[in-house]
Image: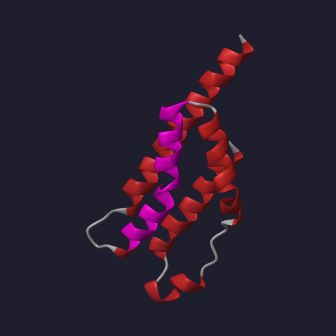
Amino acid sequence: MSFLDSDLTAMCEVYGLIFVDKAERNNVKIENNHLSQLPSVQARIKGLGDEKLYQEFRSFSHKRLKIGNALESPNKDPYIELESAIEIAGGIMNLLFERAKKIEN
């Protein structure tokens, strides 16, 4: 969960670059130290054996790049990518909560 929170925060920071002049964007520092945890988080999710959850996480983890690419393309809307990331993260959290409830019972 903390990885999702950190990644959503970073995605919002990337999206926020839309309000920064293109010439100044390289000077903006985006906090992304959590990305060093991506392989281990992805491996743990894969280890749960839930293919739907794993594919959702893979889709979520690619959104950061899609938001950045949309910033550079006049035909793409970076907010749509951010909104999609939020939706996917909500689905992931729901799947994880459901798994936790099953374990409790």
In the picture provided, is 97 more to the left or to the right than 73? Answer: right
Q: Quadrant of the C terminus?
A: top right
Indicate whether 2 appears above or below 50. Answer: below
Q: Residue at (60%, 79%) from the top-left corner?
A: 28
Q: Residue at (52%, 82%) from the top-left corner?
A: 25
Q: Residue at (50%, 48%) from the top-left corner?
A: 58
Q: How many marks?
A: 0
Q: Quadrant of residue 94?
A: top right
Q: Percent from the top left, x then y, of residue 83?
A: 43, 50
Q: Percent from the top left, x then y, of residue 96?
A: 62, 30
Q: Residue at (55%, 60%) from the top-left corner?
A: 12
Q: Quadrant of the N terminus?
A: top right
Taking depth in this image into account, of 42 and 10 the one nearest to the observer is: 42
Q: Percent from the top left, x then y, of residue 67?
A: 44, 63
In the picture provided, is 36 more to the left or to the right than 68? Answer: right
**Span highlighted in magenta in the image:** 50-71
In magenta segment, residue 5: no
Indicate whether 12 appears above or below 97. Answer: below
Taking depth in this image into account, of 89 and 39 the one nearest to the observer is: 39
Q: Percent from the top left, x then y, of residue 75?
A: 26, 68
In the picture provided, is 32 more to the left or to the right than 88? Answer: right
In magenta segment, residue 65: yes
